[in-house]
Amino acid sequence: MGAYIIPMKCDFTLSKYRDVCQAIVSSGYVALNVHDYLTQGYANNCIILRHDVDRKPDRAQKMAHIEHDHGITSTYYFRTVKEVFQPGIIRDISDLGHEIGFHYEVLDKAKGDENKAILLFKSELEELRKIAKITTICMHGNPLSSWINRDIWNKYDFNDFGIIGEAYLSIDYSNVSYFSDTGRAWNSSKHSIKDIVEDNPYKGTIRSTDELIDLIQSQTQQNICILTHPNRWTDNFGAWMFELIWQNIKNKGKSMIKYRKT
């Protein structure tokens, strides 16, 4: 099954992501990782590229090489769970010039105990810093968890750990159009429970990556932030079908969670 060729019309393939990168480099936008956006003060015509590595770090590695081939640097936020914390892959992505960040989930792991969570944050950050320089962080959002991991910063200050920014908290999204592939739907909050920004300037509908590419090429947005989860992107037909089916199952589960909260 893995030998089958995915039809070109299929979305969320690495081939399609190459088209995204080509659209970016041929546009008038400047592509930035999160660190450079926060430190270089770009206010107009930039695209912030961020990837949350929740699973399948080898797919993040392939995505990183595609970006490198296009002269693009982006940010890869790595969890510290065994499946994702692969030092060789993290080093390779860092060596390509990409930013490595910490995809923390310490409130979830500590079951809401803030004192335990901050100690865990410090410990896991130190382990990741043995592999790469870490200056920005981003929470991991588990839809089944009762906690929102970024809430830990209501009590503590990430600057105390040499962190300059948190991807949800430090970017002014009132000035940045935000697009996430959560739920395999680029700007729909229907299947997003925690991957949400409060103020998104873009009010239209993007139904596919091709439509996102069209939006990039139109240059109608002042600034853009694109979040992908690399585990969703593959050219392997069997893996692609698994992700499609599994995502549909998860979306139904998320809809039930949202219904119960209303």
Image (cartoon, helix red, strand yellow):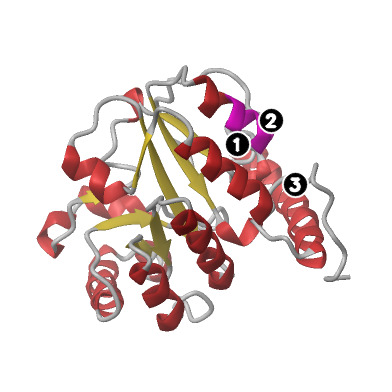
Q: Is residue 107 above or below residue 80?
A: above
Classed neighbour count for the residue bearing mark 2: other residues with Cα under 10 Å, few (<14), some (14–19), many (≥20): few
Residue 51, compared with residue 173, is above or below; it is: below
Q: Nearer the viewer, mark 2 or mark 3?
A: 2
Q: Nearer the viewer, mark 1 or mark 3?
A: 1
Give the residue pinned by disc 2.
207
* Majority secondary structure in the magenta region: helix
Viewer-closest of 118 and 99: 99
For the magenta stretch, what is the residue range? 208-214
The kind of residue tagged 3 is: Lys
Q: Which residue is mark 1?
A: 186
Residue 152 is situated, as x and y percent measured from the top left of the image, at: 27, 55
Q: Amino acid at mark 1?
A: Trp
Quadrant location of the C terminus in the rendered image: top right
| 215 is within the stretch colored magenta | no
Above or below: residue 133 compared with residue 200: below
Residue at x-position 57% and y-position 58%: 230
Spatial CA distance of label 1 from label 3 is: 17 Å
